[in-house]
Each structure stands twice: as structure tokens, then as C-alpha cells.
Image: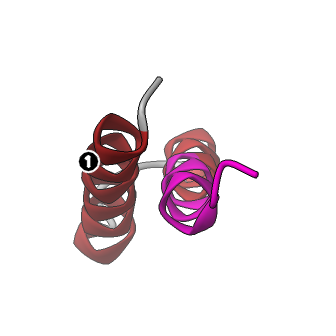
Amino acid sequence: MNGKKKKFLGAVLTAFGLGMIIAGFIPLWGLIGAIALTAAGIYLLTDNGC
């Protein structure tokens, strides 16, 4: 996966996860999933690809 695609995917996952957390309309397992999505998105955004 190239860097530009990885950054885009990371931005989408982060935005989706944060949106789910902010909305707060989801039960506990949904919140855990939203946190996991946000963490994965942040990881993809900050990953420099070594």
C-alpha cells in the first residue's frame, strides 16, 4: 500500500471513529469499536513506512 493511500485511509478511519465517539449513540461494544477504529486511523496517519 502506498503512502498516499495509507494516509487517506487513516484520515477516513480517524474521522469515522471520532464521529462515532462524539455521537455517543452507541452502546459499550460500539464505543470500543470506535476507539479501535480511531487508533488504527491515527496509526496509519503517523506511520512513516520505514
| Residue 5: image location, x then y, percent | 30, 36
Q: Which quadrant of the structure image shows residue 31?
A: bottom right
Element type at mark 1: helix
Instruction: Give the farthest residue toward the front.
Output: 50
Q: Which residue position is annotated with label 1? A: 8
Instruction: Give the farthest residue toward the bottom.
Output: 22
Above or below: residue 29 compared with residue 15: above
Left or right: 2 as drawn, with respect to 33: left
In front of the other: 20 or 11: 11
Residue found at x 59% / y 49%: 40
> Residue type at mark 1?
Phe
Residue found at x 40% / y 51%: 10
The magenta stretch spans residue 45: yes
The magenta stretch spans residue 40: yes
| Residue 9: image location, x then y, percent | 33, 41
Report the span colored magenta: 37-50
| Residue 7: image location, x then y, percent | 36, 52
Mainly helix, strand or loop, the magenta region?
helix
Instruction: Give the farthest residue toward the right.
Output: 50
Mark 1 is surrounded, within 10 Å at the Cα level, by few (under 14), some (14 to 19) or many (20 or more) other residues, namely some
Residue found at x 58% / y 68%: 46
Above or below: residue 48 compared with residue 26: below
Left or right: 14 as drawn, with respect to 28: left
Number of numbered tags placed on the structure image: 1
In front of the other: 48 or 43: 48
In front of the other: 26 or 7: 7
